[in-house]
Image (spheres, grey):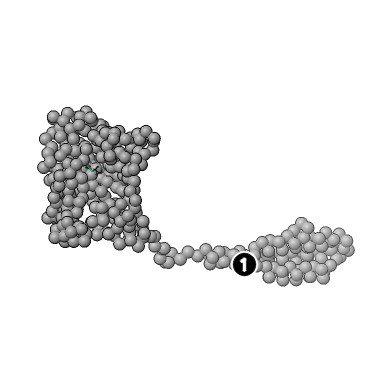
Amino acid sequence: MKTMLENIKREALEALNAAELPEHVESLRVKYLGKKGELTAILKQMGKLSAEERPIMGQLANLVRSDIENAIAQASAAADQRRMAKRLEEEALDVTIPGEPLEIGHKHPMYTVLDEIKDIFVGMGFQILDGPEIEQADYNFTKLNTDEGHPAREWSDTFYFTEDSSILLRTQTSPMQVRAMETRPLPIRVIAPGRVYRKDEVDATHSPMFHQIEGLVIDKGITMGDLKGTLNTVVEKLYGAGTKTRFRPHHFPFTEPSCEMDVQCHECGGVGCRVCKGEGWIEMLGAGMVHPKVLEGCGIDSTVYSGWAFGIGLERTALRRFNISDLRLIFENDIRFLTQF
Ligand code: PHE
């Protein structure tokens, strides 16, 4: 029995010495000291010993037990320490490593221009309106003095949703004039930016979707002089003091008189070049005095109130502002292009 006890002790100490992980140590504890363990099995045989042998073997067994227990405690502490060291190494967090830089986007050039324009108008006391892109033909055309049969209502130019041509993608932001006049108290000073849609093929100057900003002022005693003064101020703020404009007569069904405003070519200063196609001027927007029929249709007394409206293409304004030659660049969202602005 003595040899057996000594063998168990030697074996146990060797195994514990080699144990790396806490769970190895634990399974060795069970193997040697557990209820069904090897030492326990030997102790159960004590009863077979003689009365002289029993206390001696008992003492030896107790020594073996406490040696194994000590070895287990040591091995367990060492294994715990090893595990902790490994975790510390694996989960090390070096707070001195610089963070990964986040790629921050920036404003699209067209929205830069839109925000500039909004700022200018807000500074002049205008409010900014938003309105539906899916619009009733009534608002897009009829209430704007563009009756059925007018060429602007052709199926070839307009995206209609219904066979009866009553619902469409708005072709202009001008329906917002009517929506503003129908819902807002007088006087009115608003701009309404947004998307508009026309059946155009994509090329360097056309897109079936583009943006306009509608402007509308309604008050007592408003004249064409107010229109010119306001738009000249906007142009000088956008393109620099001293930028010249000219107003040409034009026709829109919902304004009378109507005009188009040109800006002197920034490239050649008005002499004529490739950019302005030899004209010296670049067309910028359509405008006019709101037609009395439109005012009356919105319940506004045209003998007391008058007003002006304009509609400006946002993409074109941005192209000119940043000297960009092709409208398609605005929509392609090529990062190499966008990061230049
Ligand atoms: N809606 C017109 C267009 O799209 C522009 C315009 C707006 C003209 C307001 C006059 C007044 O061409």
| Residue at x 25% of width, y 40% of height | 174
Q: Amino acid at mark 1?
A: Ala
Residue 280 location, quadrant: bottom left
- Please state the horizontal and vertical placement of residue 308, each as a whole percent of the image: 17, 39
> Viewed as shown, does residue 145 lie left or right of 96?
left
Q: Splitting the image into four quadrants, where does ligand 1 fall? A: top left
Residue for badge 1: 78
Q: Quadrant of the C terminus?
A: bottom left
Q: Would you say residue 237 is visible in this rendering?
A: no
For label 1, being within 8 Å of ligand 1 is answered no
The quadrant the N terminus occupies is bottom right
Tell me where residue 70 appears, x and y as whole percent. Answer: 68, 66
Residue 38: give x, y in percent of width and height: 78, 62
Viewer-proximal residue among 42 and 88: 88
Q: Could you say which is closer to the camera, residue 3 or residue 201?
A: 201
**Residue at left 55%, top 64%?**
87
**Residue shown at 75%/66% (left/top)?**
64
